[in-house]
Image (tube, rainbow, N blue to C red):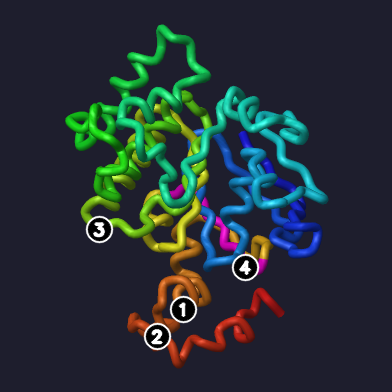
Amino acid sequence: MLTITNLQVYYDRAVEALRDASLEVRPGQIVALLGSNGAGKSTVLKSVCGVLYPEDGEILGGTITHDGISLTGFAPHEIVRRGIAQVPEGRRLFDKLTVEENLLMGGYSRPAGEVSAGLDQVFALFPAVKQHRTRVSGYLSGGQQQMVAIGRALMARPRLLLLDEPSLGLAPQIIAEIFEAIRRLRDEQGVTVLLVEQNAQLALSVANYGYIMERGRVVLDGEPAKLLSNEDVKEFYLGMGAGSGQRRSMREVKHYKRRKRWLS
Protein backbone atom coordinates (compact mmCIF):
# COMPACT_ATOMS: atom_id res chain seq x y z
CA MET A 1 0.00 0.00 0.00
CA LEU A 2 2.42 2.72 1.22
CA THR A 3 6.18 2.37 1.57
CA ILE A 4 8.48 5.15 2.75
CA THR A 5 12.21 4.47 2.45
CA ASN A 6 15.05 6.63 3.82
CA LEU A 7 13.02 9.83 3.50
CA GLN A 8 14.94 13.07 4.00
CA VAL A 9 13.06 16.36 4.28
CA TYR A 10 14.44 19.84 4.90
CA TYR A 11 12.72 23.16 5.47
CA ASP A 12 14.37 26.14 3.74
CA ARG A 13 17.18 23.71 2.82
CA ALA A 14 18.55 24.34 6.31
CA VAL A 15 16.39 22.66 8.94
CA GLU A 16 16.40 18.86 8.83
CA ALA A 17 12.92 17.56 9.59
CA LEU A 18 13.26 13.91 8.53
CA ARG A 19 16.46 11.87 8.44
CA ASP A 20 16.30 8.50 6.69
CA ALA A 21 12.75 7.83 7.91
CA SER A 22 11.34 4.50 6.76
CA LEU A 23 8.00 2.82 7.39
CA GLU A 24 5.38 0.64 5.74
CA VAL A 25 1.59 0.76 5.82
CA ARG A 26 -0.07 -2.48 4.70
CA PRO A 27 -3.58 -2.69 3.24
CA GLY A 28 -6.43 -2.98 5.72
CA GLN A 29 -4.37 -1.94 8.73
CA ILE A 30 -4.29 0.95 11.17
CA VAL A 31 -0.65 1.96 11.58
CA ALA A 32 0.20 4.31 14.45
CA LEU A 33 3.01 6.85 14.05
CA LEU A 34 3.98 8.04 17.52
CA GLY A 35 6.39 10.57 18.98
CA SER A 36 6.71 13.85 20.80
CA ASN A 37 6.24 17.33 19.31
CA GLY A 38 8.82 18.03 16.64
CA ALA A 39 9.65 14.39 16.01
CA GLY A 40 8.65 14.68 12.33
CA LYS A 41 5.29 12.88 12.36
CA SER A 42 3.29 15.58 10.59
CA THR A 43 6.10 16.08 8.07
CA VAL A 44 5.71 12.43 7.06
CA LEU A 45 2.03 12.99 6.29
CA LYS A 46 2.68 16.23 4.40
CA SER A 47 5.37 14.48 2.36
CA VAL A 48 2.98 11.72 1.36
CA CYS A 49 0.30 14.23 0.34
CA GLY A 50 2.65 16.56 -1.53
CA VAL A 51 1.88 19.61 0.62
CA LEU A 52 5.30 20.55 1.96
CA TYR A 53 5.61 23.58 -0.31
CA PRO A 54 3.52 26.09 1.74
CA GLU A 55 6.18 25.85 4.47
CA ASP A 56 9.17 25.72 2.09
CA GLY A 57 9.66 22.05 2.82
CA GLU A 58 11.41 19.84 0.29
CA ILE A 59 12.16 16.16 -0.11
CA LEU A 60 15.91 15.84 -0.74
CA GLY A 61 16.25 12.08 -0.52
CA GLY A 62 14.44 8.79 -0.21
CA THR A 63 11.29 7.44 -1.83
CA ILE A 64 7.54 7.32 -1.21
CA THR A 65 5.61 4.68 -3.14
CA HIS A 66 1.89 3.91 -3.16
CA ASP A 67 0.82 0.60 -4.65
CA GLY A 68 4.31 0.30 -6.12
CA ILE A 69 4.19 3.70 -7.88
CA SER A 70 6.43 6.58 -6.79
CA LEU A 71 4.51 9.66 -5.65
CA THR A 72 7.40 11.96 -6.60
CA GLY A 73 6.15 14.68 -8.91
CA PHE A 74 2.46 14.11 -8.25
CA ALA A 75 0.44 17.24 -7.42
CA PRO A 76 -1.73 17.11 -4.26
CA HIS A 77 -4.98 16.74 -6.23
CA GLU A 78 -3.47 13.86 -8.19
CA ILE A 79 -2.52 12.12 -4.94
CA VAL A 80 -6.11 12.49 -3.75
CA ARG A 81 -7.31 10.89 -6.98
CA ARG A 82 -4.94 8.00 -6.29
CA GLY A 83 -6.95 7.27 -3.15
CA ILE A 84 -5.02 9.11 -0.42
CA ALA A 85 -6.69 11.72 1.78
CA GLN A 86 -5.43 13.60 4.84
CA VAL A 87 -7.19 15.05 7.87
CA PRO A 88 -4.77 17.76 9.04
CA GLU A 89 -4.03 18.66 12.62
CA GLY A 90 -6.43 21.32 13.90
CA ARG A 91 -9.33 20.29 11.59
CA ARG A 92 -8.95 23.33 9.26
CA LEU A 93 -12.55 23.44 8.10
CA PHE A 94 -13.91 26.19 5.91
CA ASP A 95 -15.47 27.81 8.95
CA LYS A 96 -17.81 30.11 7.03
CA LEU A 97 -19.32 27.23 5.08
CA THR A 98 -21.97 24.84 6.39
CA VAL A 99 -21.26 21.28 7.39
CA GLU A 100 -22.71 19.96 4.15
CA GLU A 101 -20.77 22.47 2.05
CA ASN A 102 -17.54 21.36 3.74
CA LEU A 103 -18.33 17.76 2.98
CA LEU A 104 -19.14 18.55 -0.64
CA MET A 105 -15.74 20.23 -0.97
CA GLY A 106 -14.17 16.94 0.05
CA GLY A 107 -16.07 15.12 -2.67
CA TYR A 108 -14.96 17.35 -5.54
CA SER A 109 -13.02 14.51 -7.17
CA ARG A 110 -15.96 12.09 -7.17
CA PRO A 111 -18.57 11.72 -9.93
CA ALA A 112 -21.68 13.75 -9.18
CA GLY A 113 -23.79 10.61 -8.91
CA GLU A 114 -21.69 9.32 -5.99
CA VAL A 115 -21.76 12.45 -3.84
CA SER A 116 -25.17 11.82 -2.27
CA ALA A 117 -24.17 8.30 -1.29
CA GLY A 118 -20.98 9.70 0.20
CA LEU A 119 -22.94 12.12 2.38
CA ASP A 120 -25.13 9.27 3.60
CA GLN A 121 -22.06 7.24 4.54
CA VAL A 122 -20.52 10.11 6.49
CA PHE A 123 -23.74 10.80 8.39
CA ALA A 124 -24.11 7.10 9.17
CA LEU A 125 -20.60 7.08 10.62
CA PHE A 126 -21.10 10.34 12.55
CA PRO A 127 -24.80 10.71 13.45
CA ALA A 128 -23.91 13.56 15.81
CA VAL A 129 -23.22 15.90 12.89
CA LYS A 130 -26.14 14.94 10.66
CA GLN A 131 -28.54 17.21 12.53
CA HIS A 132 -26.10 20.11 11.97
CA ARG A 133 -25.69 19.63 8.22
CA THR A 134 -26.99 23.15 7.45
CA ARG A 135 -25.16 24.83 10.33
CA VAL A 136 -22.08 27.01 9.72
CA SER A 137 -19.16 24.81 10.69
CA GLY A 138 -17.36 27.56 12.61
CA TYR A 139 -20.06 27.34 15.28
CA LEU A 140 -19.67 23.62 15.92
CA SER A 141 -17.93 22.16 18.95
CA GLY A 142 -14.36 20.92 18.57
CA GLY A 143 -15.51 17.32 18.51
CA GLN A 144 -18.13 17.97 15.86
CA GLN A 145 -15.59 19.83 13.75
CA GLN A 146 -13.21 16.89 13.95
CA MET A 147 -15.97 14.56 12.79
CA VAL A 148 -16.71 16.87 9.86
CA ALA A 149 -13.01 17.05 8.99
CA ILE A 150 -12.78 13.25 8.88
CA GLY A 151 -16.03 13.10 6.92
CA ARG A 152 -14.71 15.62 4.40
CA ALA A 153 -11.68 13.40 3.75
CA LEU A 154 -13.91 10.33 3.44
CA MET A 155 -15.96 12.04 0.74
CA ALA A 156 -13.01 11.40 -1.61
CA ARG A 157 -13.45 7.65 -0.96
CA PRO A 158 -9.81 7.15 0.06
CA ARG A 159 -8.24 3.74 0.35
CA LEU A 160 -5.55 5.30 2.57
CA LEU A 161 -6.61 7.83 5.22
CA LEU A 162 -3.96 9.96 6.96
CA LEU A 163 -5.06 11.26 10.36
CA ASP A 164 -3.00 13.92 12.15
CA GLU A 165 -3.68 14.14 15.91
CA PRO A 166 -7.44 13.42 15.78
CA SER A 167 -7.71 13.46 19.60
CA LEU A 168 -6.08 16.87 20.04
CA GLY A 169 -8.01 19.11 22.43
CA LEU A 170 -11.09 16.90 22.65
CA ALA A 171 -13.05 15.53 25.61
CA PRO A 172 -12.55 11.83 26.46
CA GLN A 173 -16.08 10.82 25.41
CA ILE A 174 -15.69 12.46 21.99
CA ILE A 175 -12.26 10.88 21.55
CA ALA A 176 -13.79 7.47 22.24
CA GLU A 177 -16.46 8.07 19.57
CA ILE A 178 -13.90 9.16 16.99
CA PHE A 179 -11.59 6.22 17.62
CA GLU A 180 -14.53 3.83 17.42
CA ALA A 181 -15.31 5.36 14.02
CA ILE A 182 -11.68 4.79 12.97
CA ARG A 183 -11.99 1.13 13.95
CA ARG A 184 -15.21 0.81 11.95
CA LEU A 185 -13.58 2.35 8.88
CA ARG A 186 -10.96 -0.37 8.95
CA ASP A 187 -13.15 -3.29 9.96
CA GLU A 188 -16.30 -2.52 7.97
CA GLN A 189 -15.05 -0.55 4.97
CA GLY A 190 -11.49 -1.79 4.61
CA VAL A 191 -9.97 1.69 4.81
CA THR A 192 -6.24 1.69 5.58
CA VAL A 193 -5.22 4.32 8.13
CA LEU A 194 -1.92 5.99 9.01
CA LEU A 195 -2.60 7.54 12.40
CA VAL A 196 -0.34 10.23 13.89
CA GLU A 197 -0.84 10.58 17.64
CA GLN A 198 0.96 11.77 20.76
CA ASN A 199 -1.33 9.65 22.93
CA ALA A 200 0.56 6.39 22.49
CA GLN A 201 -1.74 4.18 24.54
CA LEU A 202 -4.83 5.42 22.74
CA ALA A 203 -3.31 4.97 19.29
CA LEU A 204 -1.94 1.50 20.04
CA SER A 205 -5.34 0.41 21.35
CA VAL A 206 -6.67 0.47 17.76
CA ALA A 207 -3.51 -0.07 15.72
CA ASN A 208 -2.24 -3.21 14.02
CA TYR A 209 1.32 -1.92 14.02
CA GLY A 210 3.23 1.06 15.39
CA TYR A 211 6.29 3.20 14.73
CA ILE A 212 7.95 5.61 17.14
CA MET A 213 9.82 8.65 15.85
CA GLU A 214 12.48 10.80 17.47
CA ARG A 215 14.41 13.66 15.89
CA GLY A 216 13.17 12.93 12.40
CA ARG A 217 13.79 9.19 12.25
CA VAL A 218 12.04 5.99 13.21
CA VAL A 219 13.69 4.56 16.31
CA LEU A 220 11.38 1.69 17.25
CA ASP A 221 8.60 -0.31 15.64
CA GLY A 222 6.51 -3.38 16.29
CA GLU A 223 3.07 -4.75 17.02
CA PRO A 224 1.11 -2.92 19.75
CA ALA A 225 1.63 -5.61 22.40
CA LYS A 226 5.39 -5.50 21.83
CA LEU A 227 5.54 -1.70 22.07
CA LEU A 228 3.28 -1.52 25.13
CA SER A 229 5.47 -4.02 26.96
CA ASN A 230 8.70 -2.21 26.09
CA GLU A 231 10.15 -0.56 29.21
CA ASP A 232 11.42 2.47 27.28
CA VAL A 233 7.99 3.02 25.71
CA LYS A 234 6.33 2.70 29.12
CA GLU A 235 8.63 5.27 30.65
CA PHE A 236 9.02 7.81 27.88
CA TYR A 237 5.66 7.62 26.07
CA LEU A 238 3.19 6.25 28.61
CA GLY A 239 4.63 8.18 31.57
CA MET A 240 5.04 5.02 33.63
CA GLY A 241 8.08 4.08 35.66
CA ALA A 242 9.78 0.93 34.44
CA GLY A 243 7.86 -1.91 36.05
CA SER A 244 6.36 0.33 38.72
CA GLY A 245 2.96 1.12 37.26
CA GLN A 246 3.33 4.63 38.65
CA ARG A 247 3.56 7.85 36.72
CA ARG A 248 6.98 9.48 36.62
CA SER A 249 7.38 13.06 37.77
CA MET A 250 8.67 15.65 35.29
CA ARG A 251 11.79 15.98 37.44
CA GLU A 252 12.52 12.29 36.95
CA VAL A 253 12.03 12.28 33.17
CA LYS A 254 13.37 15.69 32.13
CA HIS A 255 16.70 14.15 31.09
CA TYR A 256 15.07 11.34 29.13
CA LYS A 257 16.78 12.15 25.83
CA ARG A 258 20.25 11.30 27.05
CA ARG A 259 18.97 8.11 28.69
CA LYS A 260 17.21 6.66 25.65
CA ARG A 261 19.23 3.72 24.49
CA TRP A 262 17.99 4.07 20.92
CA LEU A 263 19.49 7.57 20.57
CA SER A 264 23.02 6.50 21.52
Give the mark nearest the N terminus, 2 or 4.
4
Q: Which residue is mark 3?
A: 171
Q: Is residue 28 left or right of residue 6?
A: left
Q: Which residue is mark 1?
A: 235
Q: Which residue is mark 2?
A: 248
Residue at 17 percent of width and 30 percent of height: 131
Give the mark nearest the N terminus, 3 or 1.
3
Give the residue type at disc 3: Ala
Give the residue type at disc 2: Arg
- Asked whether disc 2 touches disc 1, contact meaning CB atoms under 8 Å apart, the reply is yes
Judge by depth and name the residue closer to the eye, 230 or 108.
108
Whether 146 is among the magenta residues is no
Above or below for 100 versus 2: above
Q: Which residue is mark 4?
A: 214
Judge by depth and name the residue closer to the eye, 23 or 39.
39
Residue at 47 percent of width and 45 percent of height: 163
Q: CA distance from mark 2 to mark 4?
A: 20 Å
Q: Residues within 10 Å of mark 1 (few under 14, many from 20)?
A: many
Give the mark nearest the N terminus, 4 or 1.
4
Q: Position of residue 184 (x, y in %)?
A: 33, 36
